[in-house]
Every structure is written in C-alpha cells, then in structure tokens.
Amino acid sequence: MIDVVDLVKHYRASDGGIVRAVDGVSLSVSPGEMVGLLGANGAGKTTTLRVLATLLKPTSGGATVAGHDVATDPVGVRRALGYVSATTGVPDRLAPREILATYGSMHGFDGSALRERIDVLLDVLGLAGVADRPCGRLSSGQRQRVSLGRALVHDPPALVLDEPTSALDVIGSRDLMAFLDRLRAEGRAILVSTHRLHEIERRCDRFVIIDAGRIVAQGTREQLGAGREGGLEDAFFAAIGPGAVP
Amino acid sequence: MNDAPPVPGRWQAVRAIARRDLLEFVRDRRTLFVTLLMPMAMYPVLALSSLLSVRSSLDDPGAARPPSRLVLAVSGADALPLVAWVRSLPDTVESRAGWPEQLEIEAVAFDAADRMRREGSVDAWIEAPRGTIAGLDATGTVSLEVQLPDVEEVGSRARDHVTAVLRGLADDARRRRMGAAGLPESVLEPVAFTFSGGTAAPGGLSLRGVVPIAAGAVLVLLALLMATGAFYPAIDAIAGEKERGTIETLLMAPCSPGDLVLGKFLAVLAVTLATLAANVVSIALTMTVLLRFMPAHAALGLDAGTVAAAVVVALPAFVGLAAVAAAMSLAVTAASKSVKEAQNTLTPVILLVSGLAGAALLPGLGSSPWVAAVPFTGQVAVTRSVLFEADDPSPRRVGRADEDGRDGSLPLVPLAITLVSSALVSWLLLRATALVVTDEEILFRGPDAVTSGWSRPMPRARPTAWQGFGAALAGFAALWYVQGIAPADLARAILVQQAVAILLPLALLAWWQRVDASTTFALRWPAPDAARGLVATGAAALAGGGLFFLGAAALLAARGTGMSPEAEALSRRLFGFMRDTPPWQAALLVSVVPALVEETFFRGWILTAFAGRSSPPGRRAFANVAQAALFALFHMLPERMPQTFALGLLLGWLTIRSRSLLPAVVGHAVHNAMPLALVAWAGDAAFDAELVSPLSAALPTEIVAAAAVAFAAGLGAFVGATAESAGSPRPR
C-alpha cells in the first residue's frame, strides 16, 4: 500500500549548503500493517513522511501510495492517504463539525453522505459532545482527535502519522494508539513515527530505524532483538551506534 | 473501510476552501472592525470635521465675527454740514465694498478730535475747513486729510472703511454736480448689469474649489480602504495558517496549489467586496447627511446625473481593484511564516499603493490612457475623470457636450483598460502566490532562516526568486537616483546609467550571494556544436532586428506620429547623438554596452532567479513575463514600453530555450543597432527639422514586410538550431 523506493531528499540549508535529509530510504507498508519509523531528531523521519504526504518533492527515487506516485500523481496520493503530524493544527475559530465538513467537501462528499460520515467520525473519535464548539476551546487531546478525524474523513486506505502523541498526556496517547489499532484492524496501512518507543513497542508489526537519512535496521521486534531485557530502546541505540548513546 | 470516496470536482474543493476561510474571517473581530466599522466610522468623522470647517468659514460670516464699525470725528468750520451730508447719503452707497456696518460720525472741536485720535476713541479724524461743502458742489477737487490712530491694526481697518465712506460721498457729490449742470444721472452710468441663474444664491458661496479636492481625497481613501480591507484576511489566509500549523493539512487537499490559492482568494475577495459595500453605503449616507446640513447657498457644482455616472463607473472599477487588493495581499504575505512577519511585510506595501492612488490626483496624469492600466492609480483616475475635467476642477456634465464642445460621455475605454489590467494583474499575482505557497524552502524554512538575512550564504548555483525581485527593486531605485547625477553629455550619461543603475547592484548582489556565474548568467554555448550555435546566434540577430521594425510599425499604427514631449526630446537627443558621434562609438554606446549589461541583469540574474531550477513550463513562462515587464518598466517612457516588453519576452524566450545568454545579447544588440542602420540609410533626411526621427515620417511597407520575414525566419532557425538544448536536462 505504501512503498518507498530508494528515496533521496536534499535540502538547501539557510547558509546555502546542502543537507542530505533522506539518503536512499526504501520501505513498504502493507494493508492491515502498522510500521513504526524510529530515529533521533534530524534523522530524516519527518522528511520521509512529508514526501509521502506530497508536501515535499523527492530529489530522486520515489514513493507510491495505493499505486499513486507522489511525484506524478500527488492528487491521487492525497485521496488515498491520511496525514497527521504534531505540527498540524486545527483552526481555532472553527468547530470540529465544520472542519470535517470542509475536508469532506474537498474530497467530494456532500449532502446526506457527508453528514453521515461526519456523525460517524465524531462518534468514533468521542467528539460528539463538542462537535459544535470552536476548536480554540478544546483540549489538546480533543484537538488531536479532530486532526485525526480530518485525516480520516475521506476514508483513506493508508495513514501516515508523524509524532501524533507528542502533545498528548498519557491518557490521550493511550486512547489514540488504541484507535490506531482499530484502524489497522480495518485493513489500513499505517506508518507512524514517534520518539515514545514504549507506546508503539507492542503495537507495531515492524519497525524501521533511520539515522542520518539512511535505514540502519528494520524488522519485527524479535528480528531487531528487542525481546531482550532492554527491549526496543536498547535495540534502537544498538542500531544507531554508540555515538548516539548519552 | 468503505467504498472509494467520490471524485471531487475542481470547483467543489475551491468552494470548500473559500467557505472555510470565509467562516474564519467573519469570526475574527479584527477583520470585522477593519471591514465594516472603520469605513462606517471614518467618513462621518471626516465629513463632520469638514462640515464644521465649511460652515464656520463660508456659511455665516456675520455670526463668525463682530460687525464692522467706524467711529469718525469731523472738525472744522464745515464739520456740521459735512456730517449731515454723510448721514443723508442714499442707501445704495452702503453696498459699496468696505462700507462699515455701523457708522458713527460726529462733528467735534479740533482739540477734542485730536485728543480722541490720540486716545484711540475714534477710528479716524477728518478736518473739514470752510469751503469744503462749497468745493464739493463746485467743479474742482476738494482735498481732505484723514488722520488715523497710531495703532497699526485699527488704522488698516479704518482706512478701508473711511475710503468707502468718502467714495460714497464723492459719488453723491458727483450726482449733485450733474443735476446742477442739467445732465441726467445716467451720464455717469453708461452700463447697468445684474446677475441671474447659477446654483449659488445671490451673495452665496461656491464650493467648486473644494469639491474636486474632497472628491479626490474620498476616492484615494476608498482605494486605501480596499487594501486595508484585504489586510487581515490575507494575512490570516496563509501566514495565519502557517502559524497555526494548518497549512499542511490544506496542502494535502486533493486539488492543485492554484485551486487552493483560488479558494483563499475568493474568500479574501468576498471580505474586500464587503469593505467596498460598507464604504459605498457609508459614503452615500454621509453625503446625504452632509448635504442636509450644508449651508443652503453653498454650491457643490455637481449635478445628480454626473454623480450617478461616477457611481456607474466607480463600482466596476473598484470591484476590479478589490480583486487586485486581495491578490496583492495574498502574494505579499505568501512567503511569511507568521502573522507578525506578514504584517511587517504588507504594511509598507499598503503605504506604497496609497501613494499610487494619490498619484491619480497629480495634474496631467489623469489624461493619459496608460494611467488607467496602473492598479490603484487607474481606478481613482477613471472615476475622477467622470466628475471633473482633466487638469481643471470644472465639474463635467455627463451625457452631453458642454459649451466648449468638450465631450461629456462616459470614459468607457479607460474603464475597460482598468478592468483588463485588474484581471491580468490579479491573475499574475495569484500565479505567483501558488508558486510561493508550495515552495519547499519557504514552507518549511525554520526561524534561523528568517534572521540570517545579513549573513553571507554559502556558494550557490543561482539566486532565489526574492533575490531577483530585490535586484529589480535596487535597480529601479538606482535608476531613479542616477537621473540626478547623470551628465548632460549623452555618451557619458549612458555609461553612468548602465554602470550605476545596473552593474553596481548586480555586482554587489552576485558577490554577496556567491552565486555560480556560469549558471546564473547562462554562460554556455547555445547549441551542442559550434555550427548550430552560430546559426542560433545569427537567428537571434535576425529576430531582434526584425522585431525593431515590427514594433516601430505597430507604434506608428497605434499612435501615429504624435509623441509625448519626453519621448520627442529623447528621440531628438538620440538621433543628434548618432549624427554627431563616430559610428563605432555610437554603436558601442547605443547597441553593444546596453545589450551586454542589460542582458546580464535581466535575462541573467532576474530571469534565472524567477525561473529557478528545473522549473515547470508554467513557472518559466511566468518568469519570462515578469522579467519582460520589469525590463519594460526600466525603460520608463510609456511609448517605449510595449516594444521593450515584446523585446524582453523574445530575449527571455531565447535564453530559456538555448540556456545561453549569447543569443539574447546578440539579438538585443542588433535590435538597438537598427536606428543606427536607419540613420545611415536615410542620411541627412533623417534630421529634417520636421522629423523627430526617421520613423516618424512613414515606414515603407517593404521594410515592414522584410522585418516580418526576418523575424519569422529568425525564430524558425533558432528553434531548429536549439532543439537539443531545449530537450536536455536543466543544470542544477
């Protein structure tokens, strides 16, 4: 469902130099699979996910979502993908129902089909009670659920989440991850990046560890040796090398 | 998961974005204040202060100051009969200018009069010796001395009043003399006349001098409020989205960046149109109130038909301006990362456009059709032209020619030019916005990039689009200032202009930004091999030369031989220079130097900056149009702009296609050399006193036909010679 092949993305830094943010990354996520993308700050996780979300163009290599190429068919990718990141906010002056209606309309829903879709999402996300309250008056957890609803309003088969729990408390994080389990069970392909290894350690089917723009390890929890005492955290540090250990 | 969602239509996404943004705008108190409250409050405040000023200065002068009064002392043997005579003067003399509203005249003794004068208790003292009355009744001239107090202020006022009184006395004495001589009084009044008609009541006051200024100020204010109406929505629409972190979700919408920007534009436009509506309502209501309380005899000088015609013209013109204001505000704020940054960027632009609007009130500007095409200036000028004659505050009478035969019809052609210009400018600005919104560097640049403007960057291949724009601005500023230091001698003036206005900013920028000269200035051979490179260069020369004559023929067809004084003066200077300068030197200064310097600047730096790396055809076309427009503006004279714009387009296309600056340099040089060739061909006939230039007489059909053939052949040969260059990958 999500296929990344030899993806390269270079930036120009503010001083005019070139930054190799992603340098030959290849990965795939199948339907009904949740893959965790792990890496330190600046490792290239967000850049990889932004290329998948068609917000950045690859320098070379490529990626497809549900068969749509991110470079040549970005609109097709957007119709097949839901994207949520820690930095994606919601408009303070709009209510959850209005936000979902806007994005639903953009994706071609209208009339009773749109209203039904919105009601289902609000119910599933636990937002029915605040559906008409401006987002500026919602909690962080509620706002993040609105953001997730916005990403799901067009019922995409693939979902990409970049640090989705970084602004949430423990309860909010647990609820969100439980919801992701449900989405995976529905057959969606999910690629999620996070710093909170314990949150995804037992939820993801596979992990991809990235460092300095390159994949340094990937596989199931067992394949990465995370079954030992230190768990996924030790496996992560082992993969990115001793220099990263504090 | 359910079945695949429906495929959205393009307009469905655009509508959804517009509706979403509009919902946000109307829930923002700042937007509501600027859109509705400010116009509704501003015009009444301005009108109230104007009304008070007009009423106090024009309406009731009697109530504004104390009545004028003259205390006159008369001494001497004939004092009593003189006082009696003055008191019995007929009422008609009291309408004389300067006549006091209260006149107190008394006969007093000499000493008393002198004392009263010194004390200041009288305004004037007249000594009437014996024989004064007899002298007035005789045929001679009676000399009277009027002594005034030593206080300067009182003396000045009293002098006017005494003069009026004594002239009244002289008029009456003249009538008595005529009667004594048996002549009718009509001998003294060979002409009698009265005034009738006019809008002002007799003795009333006209506001004709004030109305054009006030109307112009209202139109400028309206244009300015259009821009401020778009201010907050535009900032909120893009910079606000970035600040809130919602821009990424919008860019994930299943539509193109152009559609996204179009949706936002429609929302900002709706708010700007609401501002226009609020302004129109406020102006109409304010005018109603103003007219009700205006002094009855104060004449505006505008009839209802003319005002209605002005509204008919102003509404579409200012709707176009609302589109320009909305698109401009979006384009200017598109690169801003935060609301504060956007405010800092947009505020000076608002000040700049208010200057453009104000420029429409300058004498002489309103009569030029080119003015109608300039955003903000054009809308004000076109509307004002309905109300008043150009360069003359006289109100127009729309619908009929006046006594002088001046046409009173609506300015439909300038209105059409304004509307077309508004649409074109808005479209270009929206295209630019779409490019900027999706620019990865701008979209995801961190705060460090914002503050690193003064740090010299690492070496890079080419300048950014903003550096191209900055270079153009620096060039324009330098071009303006160089006019003040340019020598009178044309040869040296050309060199100074090219060096200071173009080379200096270019060299500074290129050095500071550490761009790669080869990439930025397209320093490469235009074709894979020498032969095809030569063909391409020769073809560019043909096209450039042909374009000169085609442009000249088009200009003659459009304007005839008439030229503005500025263009005529420049033509005379240029042709005089070409006649008096050795050909090699003239060719160097008119053709080679400008071609080298201007191509390095416009088709080198600016076009490369605007086009960017491996840009899509749409952006390259936009870059070409933008640099050609700047190139045309750089040549300043409106008559030359269409030709220089076309030349800029051609040279830009040559550079984009061949990825080499050489064809553009050669094409430009040959284009500029054509007047020299023409002078050589026409000989002394070119400098006939009646001819401003050889072209002003006529352009033979065979020359135009040959130019068209050369132009077409040049383009064809160039396309053939550069087929491989056009298809090869663009350098990074």
Image (cartoon, coloured by chain):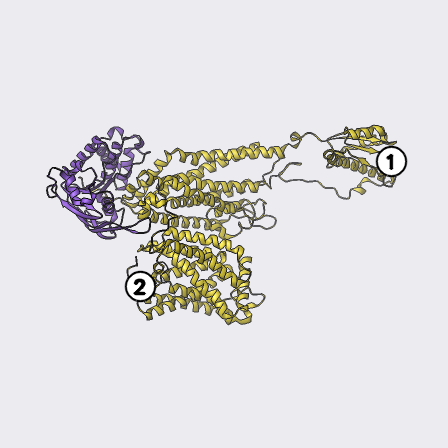
* Real-space Cα separation, disc 1 to disc 2, in angstroms: 109 Å
Q: In this view, does B545 lie above or below B278?
A: below
Q: What element carries label 2?
A: helix
Determine whether, in the image, residue A32 is placed left or right of residue B711.
Answer: left
- Residue B168: x and y in percent read 78, 36
Decide if residue B295 is in sight here: no
Asked which quadrant contains residue B158, the reply is top right
Determine whether, in the image, residue B255 is placed left or right of residue A176.
Answer: right
Q: Is residue B552 above or below residue B38?
A: below
| Residue placed under numbered mark 1 in the picture | B132
| Residue placed under numbered mark 2 in the picture | B725
* Residue nearest the viewer, comparing B499 with B103: B499
User: Which amino acid, mark 2?
Assistant: Ser
Determine whether, in the image, residue B384 is placed left or right of residue B32.
Answer: right
Decide if residue B466 is in sight here: yes
- Residue B119: x and y in percent read 78, 28
Closest to the camera, between mark 1 and mark 2, is 2
Asked which quadrant contains residue B662, the reply is bottom left
Q: Is mark 1 on a helix, strand or loop?
A: helix
Q: Give the letter of the purple chain.
A: A
The answer for which chain carries disc 1 is B
User: Which amino acid, mark 1?
Assistant: Thr
Q: Give the letter of the yellow chain.
A: B
